[in-house]
Image: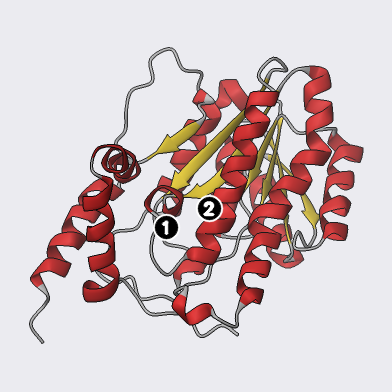
Amino acid sequence: MTPNPLRRAMRQSINVLTKPVPIPRLGTPSLAERVSGRVVLITGASSGIGKRLAERVAGAGATAVVTARRADELDRLVQSIEATGGKAHAVVGDLSTEEGINEVAQAVLDRFGAPDVFVSNAGRSIMRSVAESEHRLHDYERTMRLNYLAGVGLTLRLLPEMRRRRSGHVVHSSSIGVLSNLPTFSAYIGSKAALDAFFGVAAIESLRDGVHFTNVHLPLVDTEMIAPTDWSGFASLTVDQAADMLIDAIRRRPRAVNNPLGSMYLAAESVAPRTLHRLQNLMFHEIGVGQSTSES
């Protein structure tokens, strides 16, 4: 079948803008200067981005406190970090429940106090259009529980001590979809946008307390999460490149970190929103970017 030329052009444009552009950060502290001798809590750390970030911060001298549901995977990660001379500690927990959130928070506070850096990385995704979701409110409930409430719940427990000591950094492993309103991901993007907004409010309230909040808008990343969806032809970041974006956030402590594609969406939304929306609608109806999941 002859490839759709418009689809090909769209993909090429997106792919060119997906990869982050390394920018020299003169005067910016190195990762080691930010985290060496400090505690970094990472959720969703049993695989993918969270796992790689844990390895990177431990390699820079931090104690990586890693949490997820899969105890075996966490144990292997801790052993791997310790085998290379790093420090790591596993906290097994299910962040999709209030009880699980409180258990993880208490375990961290009891052993370490509030971490110096908290990376809210745990998440789940689902691909289904709004039109196909008439009787699927549970999709939205499940994504909100893990993608939004887990980050909120842990922040609420950890923030008081950060404010008392007047230092701390909370980082959200967010999505470029928050900027682009990517069709068929309303449940996922809605939950990520909610945590973006929560962190935005918390950042304003904590401005005088020495606590920083950063939303990192990651593009497509080659992890287990994207496996059920056909993204053939679209460029994705490696977990190392995604970790680089989170590390950039830890080093600079900005309010947001975007790749070139995310910055383009922000500019287009400001300058030519109607044109942008028509192009996105065309991609959804005429070109297609994948197939809906069969998750029930």
Image position of 4 with respect to 261: above or below: below
Residue 212, horizontal then vertical, whole percent: 63, 26
Image position of 266 with respect to 2: above or below: above
Instruction: Give the total number of marks visible in the rendering.
Output: 2
Which disc, if any, is residue 221?
1
Q: Residue furthest top?
A: 27
Of the image marks 2 and 1, the number of the one nearer the N terminus: 2
The front one of 106 and 176 is: 176
Which disc, if any, is residue 204?
none
The front one of 73 and 244 is: 244
Image position of 246 with respect to 44: above or below: above
Residue at the image point whose x is 78% and y is 26% from the top: 162
Check whether the beta carbons of the residues at disc 2 and disc 1 lie within 8 A of each other: yes
Residue 270, by quadrant, is: top left
For disc 2, the marked residue is 49
- Quarter occupied by the C terminus: bottom right
From the viewer's perspective, tell me whether residue 158 is left or right of residue 237.
right
**In the rendered structure, which amino acid carries the disc numbered 2?**
Ile
The front one of 16 and 296 is: 296
**In the rendered structure, which amino acid carries the disc numbered 1?**
Val
